[in-house]
Image (spheres, rainbow, N blue to C red):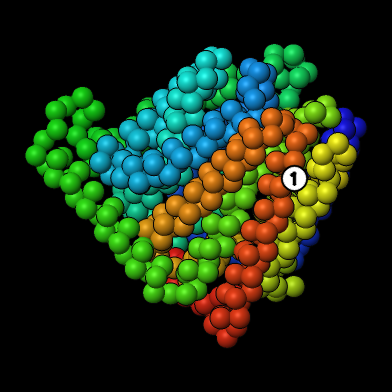
Amino acid sequence: MLVTAYLAFALLAALCVGLELAARRALPPQPAPTAVANPAFRGFQTLFLRGYLLALWADWLQGPYLYKLYRHYSFLESQIAILYVCGLASCVLFAPVAAWLPQALGRRHTCLLFCLAYSACCLTKLSRDYFILILGRVLGGLSTSLLATAFEAWYVHHHLGVRDFPHEWIPSTFARAAGWNHGLAVGAGLVANLLAEWAGLGPVAPFVLAIPCLAACGWVVLWDWGKEETEGGLGHDKSQGPLLAPPSAAAVASHISARARFWHACREGLRCLLSDRRVMLLGGVQALFESVLYIFVFLWTPVLDPHGPPLGIIFSCLMAASMAGSALYRLATSARYRLQPAHLLCVAMLLAFFSFFMLTFSTAPGQPRPRESFLAFLLLELGCGLYFPAVGFLQARVIPEERRAGVLAWFRVPLHLLACLGLLALHGEVSGTGGGEAGSGTRHMFAGCAGMMLAALLAVVSLFALGRHDTDLRLEGTRGEGDM
């Protein structure tokens, strides 16, 4: 497996480069966007990405060795499953709070809260106490929810409300962030492997490294972003008063107004979800596919680790496969090939179904085939690279922009619940049989995931049949530029 991992990484790196070059050649030549030529916007964009990418880097560093760390502390697989369930459950509980905090506490201060909470989460990994590790998972759920909301809220508020840049320039910033995100994920696996295995510092080392990265992110948010607010004429975020001042009547009213806006967005999102069958089908696809990904995140390490692969390199391979899928999506939807996102979403579901079907055989008790399992994981990540841009395109076309945040919040509820139920089922089966990694619980879970992917595929086919003549679901369809 050692040779397989390094060879796979080299091949995937070459594949990513080849697909990226092919995708760029397939794109028609276009004039440089106005945003690129605007030095004020470029400076503001760089300022935001400096803090946001540090947060993403710290997040990715914790991916390769989380399960390995818990095993290093001699916890059983059933105990580790409960730790993962605590993290997912806290994501469900803190999602509404994370959506409300930027307006109530202040956007920049919420970003600082993310840095503090995630640093505390990393510090808990130094303890072998089970309940402290559970606290760390709860803090990790809060931090993950804040990462998904607070940074974007700060950027959009300053882009539109402070700098008064055009709304159409916002996607260019998050497209740059998405491009960097894949590279950061691949690099995080390499660095984590360097620290944990080559340097012999053990699986806790990447979590320790994440702490100074989060401190650097907090410094950027506190000083550089604070300077941006001062130069923007704010002095502080308009959504709150000075950091240590007692709340004024206006601040209390603002908090109440923020809470009212949040619940209004939830009500409108639910109304949109129930009134449009396309939105309902898309939500079902997202809940099924992404809940399975959470289960995969838990299971890939116990499936491969007994065979001695470098987990950091394996993680980088998985992220490189996802990067290849993203480049393949851009190539397939280019003017040269013009495949529809709904078709590529079907391909992603097929890849995921085939991956889990393979895993039900490659993880048979007593007859593990780690190379076949590794190949199945790579195919699943390739499908992920196709899935996320395709579902993002369809969401932008189907869900009205003013209701999108509320609808997506409702999508995440069944997503996390399905993942929690899956992990609890695995915990119950492992506990009931007294098995470990070699038990049948993992195989049965993969079979269940294959069934969920088949249901997701049927939902995508239904969505495609429903919108066969719907221009909103096709690349040729047009809506407002902000929805693209």
Front residue (pair 187, 458): 458
Residue for point 41% across, 54% down? 409
Residue 320 can be seen in this image:
no
Viewer-nearest residue: 200 or 436? 436
Q: Counting other residues with Cα less than 10 Å from the Cα at mark 1, is it few (<14), some (14-19), or many (20 or more)? A: many
Question: Image quadrant of residue 62?
Answer: top right
> Relative to residue 176, is residue 231 depicted above or below?
above
Residue at 19%, 34% (x, y): give it: 241
Q: Tell me the SS state at disc 1.
A: helix
Q: Position of residue 405 (x, y in %)?
A: 39, 57
Determine the residue located farthest toward the bottom in the rendered image: 469
Q: Amino acid at mark 1?
A: Arg
Residue toward you, 188 or 288? 288
Compare residues 339 and 417 and report the one nearer the observer: 417
The residue wearing badge 1 is 443
Q: Residue furthest front?
A: 432
> Which quadrant would residue 325 be assigned to in this image?
bottom right
Vertical placement of 62 versus 415: above or below? Answer: above
**Image position of 252 with respect to 197: above or below:** below
Q: Quadrant of the N terminus?
A: top right
Residue at image point 57% right, 50% down:
291
Residue at left 71%, top 20%? Answer: 196
Q: Position of residue 28 (x, y in %)?
A: 69, 69
Q: Does residue 91 appear in the picture of this structure?
A: yes
